């Protein structure tokens, strides 16, 4: 792994990186930063928690000129993510690197820094009121969420308005729609994929937890008491569900932070700070927050349900296992969710648990369970076939005995068939 010193960066920037403990580059940084330093447009697909933010901030900071004109715009899907990026920029300033930046989250802003961080809805105002003649680079961060989140029209207008500016996309996933969007609107670019077809960090372990028989809030309270996670984010799809969980945890006197997308920004920052600083060890959050929470020491993530869009599960899970540290992602489900679970299984490997009142019991996987069910169905079919041979419309002596023998014959045949199949597999493996 190369370190930042191996790049042709300004000496002041190298010193600032070292002050903050950034010595070696992650894989996405190692591949992305040189391309951006060459002033190329790039599409970067990298799993959540891999270090994407520094991948585009380091080249931007390195290439800033000495005047006070806007040179870079970073567009994110949520205010929470914009604040997260600004917190990183703030840390560079506090470490002695001289530059200016602005978080544009309202329409009445009159002054702008050299780097602007914003959401798509404020870009038209920035274009109207800000001098962008010296704009060098636009970064579309979490591009899949920008498109999926309903900002396709705004992103299209940004790309069309700044055709002479280098535009780069960073994303955790690329579906068919985003792929066609890139082909249509982005010109020549270098594609960098460090996911190896993974959509979340390899250091995160995924667990399915059967919560059948529990109430929604009862499942969480029981799990927390049984599992006792150290630092945990709890995700749920609806605000009404979060309110229910919030009230239940409060009633049980379980300290926690509470975060929803429609909270005032100051309150959001306050709740995240409580969680980051260790004032509380549990955080309730909606899906809108799944991309905006960047806490390095999160050990566990709980998904109270399967989100409407599959990709949000991976964004949730990505809050654990940040920067290659270990983490666990628990997904609660019951019998109604099996079909959705099977779809997720195509992309990630789970192990299986059942939540009991006093324990988290390890189980066999769903495929084994289904295979057993299929085997039993074959056996029953064979029994019916053998019984049909001795059945008669007229009741004959020893009829019940004959039926019992027919069933036993079917079972023996079935067992022999399984034995022969297993022996064949063994012979094949030996050869």
Image (cartoon, grey):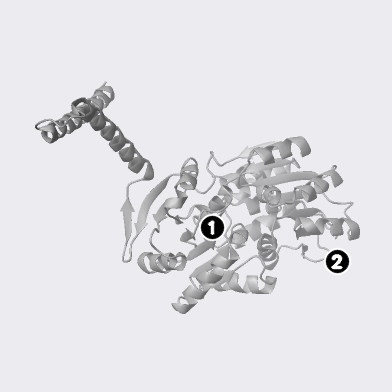
Within-10-Å neighbours for mark 1: few <14, some 14–19, many 20+? many
Q: Residue furthest front?
A: 394
Determine crowd level at label 2: few under 14, some 14-19, many 20+ residues with C-alpha closer than 10 A: few
Where 166 falls versus 188 (above or below)? below
Decide which of tag 2 and tag 1 comes sooner along the chain. Answer: 2
Disc 1 secondary structure class? loop
Residue 32 falls in image quadrant: top right
Q: In this view, does 45 lie to the left or right of 324?
A: right
Q: What residue sits 65% from the left and 43% below the top? A: 44
Q: How many labels does the image show?
A: 2
Q: Does any portion of residue 364 appear in the rendered image?
A: yes
Task: Find residue 343 and report its horizontal and vertical position in percent.
Answer: 50, 43
Quadrant that contains the N terminus? top right
Would you say 393 lies left or right of 283 here? left
Measuring from the top left, give residue 210's x and y in whole percent: 39, 55
**Label 2 secondary element:** loop
Q: Toward the viewer: 257 or 129?
A: 257
Picture residue at 87% right of the left edge, 51% below the top = 134
Seen in the image, is 321 located left or right of residue 374?
right
Do the numbered discs 2 and 1 sit on residues whose CB atoms are within 8 Å? Answer: no
The residue at 71%/44% (across/down) is 36
Q: Residue 111 carries which label?
A: 2
Q: Distance between the residues labelled 2 and 1?
A: 34 Å
Question: Which of 387 and 91 lies nearest the eye of the viewer?
Answer: 387
Which residue is label 1 attached to? 319
Residue 338 place in picture, x, y as percent: 44, 47
In the displayed structure image, the side of residue 227 where residue 36 appears, left or right:
right
Residue 408 picture location, percent across and down: 15, 33
Considering every residue shown, the one lying at the far top of the view is 431
């Amino acid at each position: 792994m190369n370190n930042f010193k191996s790049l042709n960066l300004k000496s002041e920037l190298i010193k600032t990186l070292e002050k903050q403990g950034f010595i070696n580059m992650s894989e996405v940084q190692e591949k992305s930063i040189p391309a951006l330093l060459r002033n190329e447009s790039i599409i970067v697909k990298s799993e959540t928690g891999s270090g994407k933010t520094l991948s585009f901030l380091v080249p931007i900071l390195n290439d800033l000129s000495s005047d006070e004109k806007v040179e870079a715009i970073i567009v994110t899907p949520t205010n929470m993510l914009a604040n997260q990026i600004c917190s990183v920029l703030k840390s560079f300033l506090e470490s002695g690197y001289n530059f200016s930046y602005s978080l544009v989250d309202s329409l009445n802003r009159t002054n702008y820094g050299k780097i602007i961080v914003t959401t798509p809805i404020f870009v038209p105002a920035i274009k109207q009121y800000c001098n962008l003649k010296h704009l060098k680079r636009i970064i579309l961060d979490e591009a899949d969420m920008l498109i999926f989140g309903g900002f396709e029209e705004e992103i299209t207008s940004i790309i069309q308005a700044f055709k002479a500016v280098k535009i780069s996309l960073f994303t955790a996933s690329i579906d068919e729609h985003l792929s066609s969007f890139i082909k249509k609107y982005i010109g020549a670019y270098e594609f960098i994929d460090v996911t190896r077809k993974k959509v979340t960090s390899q250091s995160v372990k995924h667990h399915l937890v059967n919560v059948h028989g529990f109430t929604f809030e009862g499942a969480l309270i029981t799990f927390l008491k049984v599992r006792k996670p150290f630092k945990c984010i709890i995700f749920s799809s609806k605000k009404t569900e979060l309110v229910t969980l919030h009230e239940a945890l409060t009633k049980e006197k379980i300290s926690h932070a509470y975060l929803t997308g429609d909270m005032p920004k100051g309150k959001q920052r306050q709740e995240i700070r409580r969680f980051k600083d260790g004032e509380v060890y549990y955080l309730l959050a909606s899906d809108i927050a799944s991309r905006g929470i960047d806490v390095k020491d999160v050990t566990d993530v709980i998904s109270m349900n399967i989100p409407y869009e599959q990709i949000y599960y991976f964004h949730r899970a990505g809050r654990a296992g940040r920067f290659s540290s270990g983490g666990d992602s628990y997904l609660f489900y019951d019998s109604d969710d099996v079909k959705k679970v099977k779809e997720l299984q195509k992309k990630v490997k789970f192990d299986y648990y059942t939540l009991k009142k006093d324990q988290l019991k390890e189980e066999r996987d769903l495929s084994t369970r289904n295979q057993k069910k299929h085997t039993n169905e074959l056996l029953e079919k064979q029994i019916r076939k053998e019984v049909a041979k001795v059945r008669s419309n007229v009741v004959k002596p020893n009829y019940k005995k004959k039926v019992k023998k027919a069933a036993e014959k079917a079972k023996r045949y079935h067992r022999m068939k399984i034995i022969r199949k297993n022996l064949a597999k063994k012979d094949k493996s030996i050869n």
